[in-house]
Image (cartoon, grey):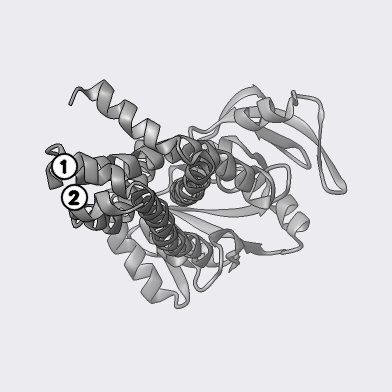
C-alpha cells in the first residue's frame, strides 16, 4: 500500500473518535513533558555543579559533608590555612556563595586566585562595600558602573563589570568575603574552599588525602560526584526516573485502552480486511501505526510542555539563580524514546486481539 494511502487510513481511523484520541494524546504528552522537564533540570544541576566546583578555575572544591545542597555547606575560614600545608596543594581560596532571589553573590578575598583570574571589563574590582557584577548579571539586571545594586535591605555601588568564563559566576555578583559573611550572618565561615593542585600532583589523589585528613569534608572533583553527594540534586535525578517510569506505565495503559476500544468498534472492518487478503502482520502494522501516530502527536505537545515547565520551575523560585535547564539532544531523544515506547507498549494487547479475530466470526458481529 502506498505510504500516503497508509497514512490516510491511519489518520481516518484516529479521527473517528477525535475526543478520545485527543485525551489519550494529552495523557502521553504530560508524560513526555515530565521527562523533558526533569532531565533538562537534572542536566542543569550537573552543569551548575561543574561550575560550582571549578570557581576560579580551581581543580576541586572542599565542602562540608552531609549537606542537602552544596551551596549550604559551611566550613571554618581557618581551615584554608591547614589545607595550605598539604604538599599537593598549590593554593587555596576562601569562597562564600550567598543566594538571593535576584542573583548569586560570591564572597572573594581580593588577593586569592578567583579574584586574580577575574577579567574586569569596566570599572574596577570591588573594594570596601562595592560590588562587581558579572557581565551576564549586568545585562540581565540592566545595571552599569556607578549604579546601585540592592540586595535585601543593603545597597551596594557597582564598582565594575567582570567576565570569568564561568557562566555560573558571570551571572552573579562578587563582593569582598567579609561583606558576604555579614549578609549571610556567618562570620568566619565559608561555603567552600577552592583548591588548585601543585604541578605534578594528581587532583583526585590530593582530594582523597584531604578528605582523610579532615573528616566530615567532601572534596568534589567532578560534576557527577557532586550530584551524588548533593542530596537535593540526587533527589531530582531519582524523582525524575521514578516519575518517568510511572508516566510510561500510565501512558501505556491509556494507549492500550484507546486502541482496544478502537479494535472492538472495528471488528467487522478488520474482518473484511482479513477476508480480502490482509495478513496478520499487516493488521498488526495498522494497529501499531495508529498507536504510534497518537504518541507522535503527543510528542510535539509534550516537548513544548516540558520546555515550558522546566523554564517555569527554574525561574519561578529561588532555584532560578542556581539551576538553568539544559536542553540537550539527549533530553529530546529521551522524550522521543518515551513516546515510541508508550506507543509500542500500548499497541501490544490490541494488536494480539486484532490478529486473533477470525474473519467469519468478525463478519457475523453486528
Residue in the foreground of this view, choosing between 318 and 261: 261
Name the spot of residue 362 as percent of width and height, x first: 25, 52
Which secondary structure, mark 2?
helix
Q: Earlier in the sequence, mark 1 or mark 2?
A: 1
Which secondary structure, mark 1?
helix
Bin the neighbour count of mark 2 within 10 Å (Cα to Cα): few under 14, some 14-19, many 20 and up.
some
Q: Is residue 50 left or right of residue 122?
A: left
How much space separates mark 1 and mark 2, taking CA atoms? 6 Å
Residue in the foreground of this view, choosing between 8 and 61: 8
Which disc number belongs to residue 91? none
The residue to which callout 2 is attached is: 359
The residue to which callout 1 is attached is: 275
The relative height of residue 1 versus residue 88 in the rendered view (above or below) is: above
Contact, mark 1 vs mark 2 (Cβ under 8 Å)? yes
Instruction: Give the quarter of the image for residue 240.
Output: bottom left
Q: Is residue 133 left or right of residue 273?
A: right
Q: Residue furthest right?
A: 153
Q: Is residue 29 left or right of residue 308?
A: left
Amino acid at each position: 500500500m502506498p505510504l500516503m494511502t497508509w497514512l490516510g487510513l491511519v489518520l481516518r481511523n484516529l479521527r473517528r473518535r477525535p475526543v478520545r484520541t485527543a485525551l489519550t494524546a494529552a495523557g502521553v504528552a504530560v508524560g513526555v513533558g515530565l521527562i523533558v522537564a526533569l532531565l533538562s533540570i537534572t542536566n542543569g544541576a550537573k552543569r551548575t555543579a561543574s561550575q560550582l566546583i571549578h570557581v576560579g578555575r580551581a581543580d576541586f572544591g572542599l565542602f562540608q559533608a552531609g549537606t542537602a545542597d552544596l551551596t549550604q555547606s559551611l566550613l571554618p575560614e581557618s581551615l584554608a590555612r591547614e589545607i595550605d600545608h598539604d604538599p599537593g596543594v598549590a593554593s587555596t581560596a576562601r569562597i562564600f556563595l550567598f543566594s538571593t532571589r535576584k542573583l548569586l553573590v560570591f564572597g572573594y578575598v581580593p588577593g586569592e586566585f578567583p579574584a586574580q583570574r577575574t577579567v574586569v571589563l569596566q570599572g574596577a574590582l570591588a573594594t570596601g562595600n562595592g560590588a562587581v557584577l558579572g557581565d551576564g548579571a549586568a545585562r540581565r539586571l540592566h545595571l552599569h558602573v556607578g549604579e546601585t545594586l540592592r540586595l535585601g535591605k543593603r545597597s551596594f555601588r557597582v564598582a565594575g563589570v567582570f567576565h570569568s568564563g564561568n557562566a555560573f559566576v558571570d551571572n552573579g555578583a562578587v563582593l569582598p568575603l567579609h561583606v558576604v559573611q555579614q549578609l549571610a550572618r556567618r562570620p568566619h565561615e565559608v561555603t567552600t574552599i577552592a583548591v588548585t593542585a601543585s604541578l605534578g600532583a594528581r587532583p583526585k589523589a590530593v582530594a582523597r588525602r584531604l578528605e582523610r585528613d579532615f573528616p566530615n569534608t567532601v572534596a568534589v572533583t567532578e560534576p557527577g560526584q557532586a550530584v551524588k553527594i548533593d542530596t537535593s540534586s540526587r533527589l531530582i535525578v531519582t524523582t525524575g526516573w521514578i516519575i518517568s517510569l510511572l508516566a510510561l506505565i500510565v501512558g501505556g495503559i491509556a494507549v492500550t485502552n484507546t486502541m482496544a476500544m478502537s479494535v472492538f468498534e472495528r471488528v467487522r472492518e478488520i474482518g473484511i480486511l482479513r477476508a480480502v487478503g490482509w495478513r496478520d502482520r499487516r493488521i498488526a502494522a495498522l494497529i501499531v501505526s495508529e498507536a504510534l501516530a497518537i504518541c507522535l502527536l503527543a510528542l510535539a505537545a509534550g516537548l513544548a510542555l516540558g520546555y515550558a515547565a522546566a523554564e517555569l520551575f527554574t525561574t519561578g523560585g529561588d532555584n532560578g539563580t542556581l539551576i538553568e535547564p539544559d536542553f540537550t539532544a539527549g533530553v529530546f531523544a529521551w522524550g522521543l524514546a518515551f513516546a515510541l515506547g508508550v506507543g509500542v507498549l500500548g499497541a501490544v494487547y490490541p494488536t494480539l486481539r486484532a490478529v486473533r479475530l477470525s474473519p467469519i466470526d468478525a463478519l457475523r458481529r453486528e
